[in-house]
Image (tube, rainbow, N blue to C red):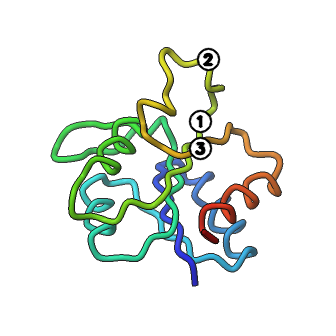
Amino acid sequence: MKSILIIEDDPFSIDFYKYIFKKASLNCLVQDDGDAVIQMLQSNNINLIIMDINLKNTYLKGQKIDGIGLSSYIKRKEGINHPPILLVSAYRSGFLEGDFLKDSLAEDFITKPIVDFNQLINKVNRFVNN
């Protein structure tokens, strides 16, 4: 079974992802601690990361970090699995200062609220079925 790591700290969003991915027969792991995420990428076969940009309670090595910073860290970190990353944001790509997709090194993004479930599942399938 394909595994998706959800990096999210909003309980409502977590429940949403669990429900959607259970229906799609995908294993859904949830984490919001940066250090635990890195450990998971060292030991688990993760096929895709879905990460919120606005992580309010996420820390890596004792420092607060957002989704853009954590995504970039994961992509640059040696010795861990580097699955594709799908960022989730309430902001549109051009709205944020700079190019968050380029800065994060993530493969793609989707905007919140997610109202088109088929678009989300299509993006997820595109990455996990490669």
* Residue at numbered disc 3: 108
**Residue type, label 1:** Ser
Q: Are marks 1 and 3 in contact (CB under 8 Å)?
A: no
**Which of the 4 image quadrants contains residue 32?**
bottom left
Across and down, in percent, residue 71 comes to 39, 44
Q: At 59% from the left edge and 35% from the top edge, which residue is drawn?
A: 89
* Residue at numbered disc 2: 95
Closer to the N terminus: mark 2 or mark 1? Answer: 1
Residue 39's tag is: none
In the image, residue 13 sits, relative to residue 79, either above or below, namely above
* Residue at numbered disc 1: 89
Q: At 52% from the left edge and 62% from the top edge, which residue is drawn?
A: 48
Q: At 58% from the left edge and 84% from the top edge, which residue is drawn?
A: 1
Across and down, in percent, residue 118 comes to 82, 57
Q: CA distance from mark 1 to mark 3?
A: 11 Å
The residue at the far left in this view is 61
Across and down, in percent, residue 73 comes to 29, 44
Q: Residues within 10 Å of mark 1 (few under 14, many from 20)?
A: some
Q: Residues within 10 Å of mark 2 (few under 14, many from 20)?
A: few
Q: CA distance from mark 2 to mark 1?
A: 11 Å
* SS at circle 1: strand
Closer to the N terminus: mark 1 or mark 3? Answer: 1
Across and down, in percent, residue 33 comes to 32, 54
Number of numbered discs overlaid on the protein picture: 3
Q: At 54% from the left edge and 19% from the top edge, which residue is drawn?
A: 96
* SS at circle 3: strand
